[in-house]
Amino acid sequence: MRLRAGDEAAFEALVSQHDAALHRVARTFVPTQALADDVVQETWLAVIRGLDRFEGRSSLRTWIFTILANRARTRAVREARNLPFSSLGEPEGPTVDPAAFGSDGTWRSAPPRLDCDPESNLLTMELRAHILDAVDELPDHMRAVITLRDIAGLSPEEVCDILEISDGNQRVILHRARAKVRTALRPIVEVSA
Amino acid sequence: MRLWPRRHRHDPLVCREFVELVTDYLDGALPESERRRFEAHLAQCDGCDGYLEDTRRLVTTLQATPPPPADPATREALLSAFRELRGES
Ligand SMILES: [Zn+2]
């Protein structure tokens, strides 16, 4: 493994790839950005020191995010802060405004679309400029799950292991998180329309 | 909590139900019979087809959004820690 052999460029690439997501996830556990920065720095140092012990049974990124979550939990307990998944007593409600549907449950009118750039098939630059802000506005547990799943691109299994939640739970949280981000982007579409 | 009248499992899906299943569908987590109901609705409803397409685009856009660059001072500190701890091995 190039990293273990001390390849600095490989380490730099790893930092570029994951640092921002690590910060975003850390911040869901601890109350301030400064504490999150500490947790991320501790994580990177633990990664550097632990490379010899990393056995490749999990993927490198799962291993890194697991170190982060463990350290962030320890820090949260020290700060007497509730962990993001300690109370999931969120009311179960629809993710789309019920007024969008008629009494038979079908769309009253076709739902508004998010603008997309036909060449890349991604949302437009204008929406992309707001998308991370929309993620940052989410409640902690939603921010943690959507960051790991959709920004860092981890699998459902990896996310369950890292956050110590069930598969069903991570999917319900992800579903609500995506719906909220979509709702947050809508006014931008409407203003620009 | 019941938000609308109970419907039977073999009834065709309606849009209101469809939108709550998109994440399960994209994760391949719907049971076979549910997946068939989902796809049957998808094939004949433009509104839901667009809703699903937008969800896919939202996810790929999130994945394609480049992370903001790490703070240069922190980055330099990490690189020198890496050099110090691993460089000689
Ligand atoms: Zn429909």
Image: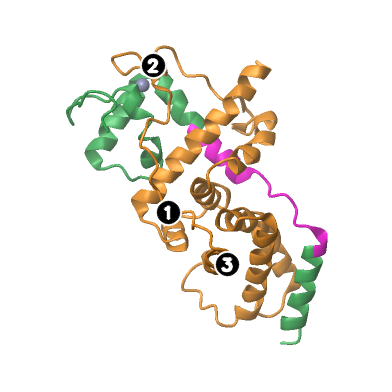
Chain colours: A orange, B green
Q: Position of residue A88 (x, y in %)?
A: 40, 48
For label 2, being within 8 Å of ligand 1 is answered yes
Q: Are marks 3 and 2 in contact (CB under 8 Å)?
A: no
Query: Which region of the structure is painted magenta?
Result: B55-73
- Sequence-wise, the earlier of marks 3 and 2 is 3
Q: Chain of mark 1?
A: A
Q: Would you say residue A2 is visible in this rendering?
A: no
Q: Residue at x 31, y 18 (%)?
A: A105
Q: Position of residue A117 (x, y in %)?
A: 64, 28
User: Dot 1 corresponds to which residue?
Assistant: A156
User: Dot 2 corresponds to which residue?
Assistant: A107
Which of pointers 1 and 3 indicates the residue nearer the eye? 3
Q: Are marks 3 and 2 on the same chain?
A: yes
Q: Nearer the viewer, residue A119 or A101?
A: A101
Q: Chain of mark 2?
A: A
User: Dot 3 corresponds to which residue?
Assistant: A75
Is B85 situated above or below B60? below
Q: Residue at x 65, y 30 (%)?
A: A127
Element on which disc 1 rests: helix
Which of pointers 3 and 2 indicates the residue nearer the eye? 3
For the residue marked with disc 2, what is the amino acid?
Trp
Element on which disc 3 rests: helix
- Sequence-wise, the earlier of marks 1 and 2 is 2
Q: What predominant SS class does the magenta segment belong to?
A: helix
Q: Residue at x 49, y 49 (%)?
A: A141
Q: Position of residue B63 (x, y in %)?
A: 58, 45
Q: Chain of mark 3?
A: A
Q: Quadrant of the N terminus of chain A?
A: bottom right
